Structure formats: structure tokens, C-alpha cells
Amino acid sequence: MSRTVGAAGAATRTGRRRVLPVVALLAVLMMLAGCGTTPAEQTPAAAANTVPPFPTPSEATELPQTSATATAPPPATCADPTASLRPVTTAADGSPLPQPNVDAIRARGRLIVGLDTGSNPFSFRDPRSSELVGFDVDIASEIARQLFGDPRQLEFRIVSSAERERALVDGLVDVVVKTMSITCERRDQVDFSTVYYQAHQRVLVRNDSGVRGGADINGIADLHDRTVCVAGGTTSLTRIQQIVPTARIMRVTEWADCLVMMQQNQIDAVSTDDTLLAGMAAQDPYLAIVGESLSEEPYGVGIPPGHDDVVRLVNAALERIREDGTWNRIYDRWLTVLGPSPGPPTPRYVD
């Protein structure tokens, strides 16, 4: 069975706090100081399952505005960042290719996958079962099936968008399946599978006028001097800073934090991939996606650098689910909010 390590889920904040009488408050503080479980006494499992609250405005980070005349550094270039290794197990002469990393994962008995719990509908906790579910979770399960013949032989480790590359480089996870766009800059640090989903960056606002971020925002051009929520460590953050340097950026850890800040009227808009924006809009009927696509965002499975055998195995799993209809079934399970299935992206190979 799969298991999860890391912060799990997210607490919902009502926005109202009951004020205790001073005497009662002092009594509570004395009780907390004199008894109860200290952090040092918690078991590792209890500590791992601690649920952090959504960030308050003081915990979110407002980035300084960039000068409208500042020149952004040119993006890194490469031949084709989405091209990956062909899913083969033998060399041109027929000899078997070495698979040391794949063998090590199989010997361990489980695939360690980095993702998060706040990217509905790609990876989030089912409110009824508390299990991690979503499009990315199903993709990860198919990789485990390719490895072991059993989609349940995996372990989830929760990583933020800003932690994805470091988790791979440091060997904390075998793969990252977390709405991770393939870019030349990221290819300098880690390897990628072929593209398993093609997303587009857009803008999310409240669809009622008279409130912050209402009907007067119709796209990227209307974000001048507006407060836009973006998760740190993402291509969405970099692109907003480049296209609208006068926007006020509120940087958070997880995309679910943006949803709560929008509902609390603390921001004007959210900008990221349409897949994640659709998940937020599905949770709140007063939100709507507006404007044209700002960019294409090709999602790939992140893999530690130099683990070519893992790259080839992941690509074999993706090739299988494209051909046998599994990819379309996963799409229909999670992404029909975006319209009918466009079909899986066509793979590109370098060899």
C-alpha cells in the first residue's frame, strides 16, 4: 500500500476567532505550560502528520515590484527541452543496458515519489478517505506498476514547488510527479521524462464585480498594480515578473494557499497553469479563469540527474498508458473540467 511522509492536507480557516476572557486565557496558558505532550515527546509518525494551517498575510511573502524598465535576464536555451531518452533496455549491439538505479528501487520494494497535497485536481487529499488522489497520483501509480507490477508499491513524500529540484539532486525521492514544467533551466539540474501533459498559464479572478479582483480583470494586461498570488519556485512566478513587472507579487508555498487568500479578499488574482486554476474554480463558484494563454507548460516527470535507466523506465510507462487508453481514462477521471480529452502529448526522443 502507498504511504505518505510529510505535511498532510490543509486546515480550513473560518476567518472568525472567538475571544476568550482574560482569566480563561491565562488558565489555558498555564495548563499548556504544565502538562500535555511536548514536541520532543511526539512520535515520528505524529510529527510527520502535523497539519500546518494556511498562511496568514504575515506568513506569505510580498515580493518587491520590479522596475518597468528593468531588463529581465534572457531564459536559458537548449535544443528541445522536452526530448527525452527512448524507452529501451538494450543497446544498439543487443547487449542489455545497465539498470543500477532501477535495480536499487526494486530491491527497496517501493517507489518514492515527490508531490504535494494542494494541487487539485493533480494531487490532493480526498476529503472522505484522506487518501492522496489526482491526475499526478495516477501517473505515479502507473510508474510503480511498470516497476513492480503493482501500482500500490509507492511512498509519497510531500515537497513544495521550490523544493522539487533539490529533492531530486539530494536523492530524497526517486521521481517528482508534481505539475513540473520542463524547461532548459531545470534541465541544467535534473532529468525529465517525455511530456505527459500540456498545460497553459492563465489568470484566475473573482467573477463578480464590486470586489477585489472582480470583473474589471480580463487578463494579464489588467494586472498592473494588482496583487497576484503565485507559488515560489515556479515558472509562473518568473513569467508574471517578466510580463507585468508592476504587479505586486504575493509568494506562497502551496497553490492551495492562493485559493484561501482569494476567498479572504487579500489578493486580486492568481496566475498559474490552467489545470491548477480549474481545480480552484471547481471549489468556488465565484472564481473564473480569464484571458488568453500566457505560455505552454509541458509537464514532465522529474528524475535525478544521471539516472538514465529510470528515465527510460518512466518513458516506457508513459508509452504504455498512451497506447492502451489508460492516459485517456486518467484524464476522464480528473480533468473533464477542462473539456474533452485532447489525447496524450506525442513523445519526442533524443536517441
Image (cartoon, rainbow, N blue to C red):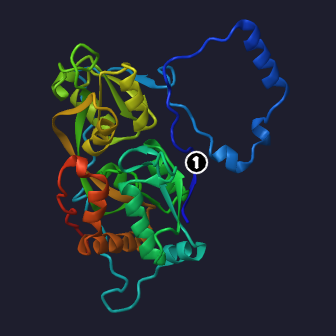
Judging from the image, what secondary structure is the residue with disc 1 in? loop
Counting from the top left corner in percent of width and height, residue 207 is at 22, 25
Is 327 or 304 nearer to us in this picture?
327
Q: Is 1 situated above or below 201?
A: below
Is 74 or 9 nearer to us in this picture?
9
Circle 1 residues within 10 Å: few <14, some 14–19, many ≥20? some
- Farthest residue to the front: give it: 128
Residue 334 falls left or right of residue 110: left
The residue drawn where x is 75% and y is 43% is: 42
Where is the C terminus found, in terms of image quarters? bottom left
Q: Is 191 situated above or below 161?
A: below
Residue 263 falls left or right of residue 56: left
Counting from the top left corner in percent of width and height, residue 24 is at 75, 12
- Farthest residue to the right: give it: 34
Q: Is residue 57 visible?
A: yes
- Farthest residue to the top: give it: 22
The residue drawn where x is 59% and y is 15% is: 18
Q: Is residue 72 visible?
A: no
Q: Is 310 situated above or below 158?
A: below
Q: Quadrant of residue 203?
A: top left
Counting from the top left corner in percent of width and height, residue 280 is at 33, 37
Question: Which residue corresponds to mark 1?
Answer: 6
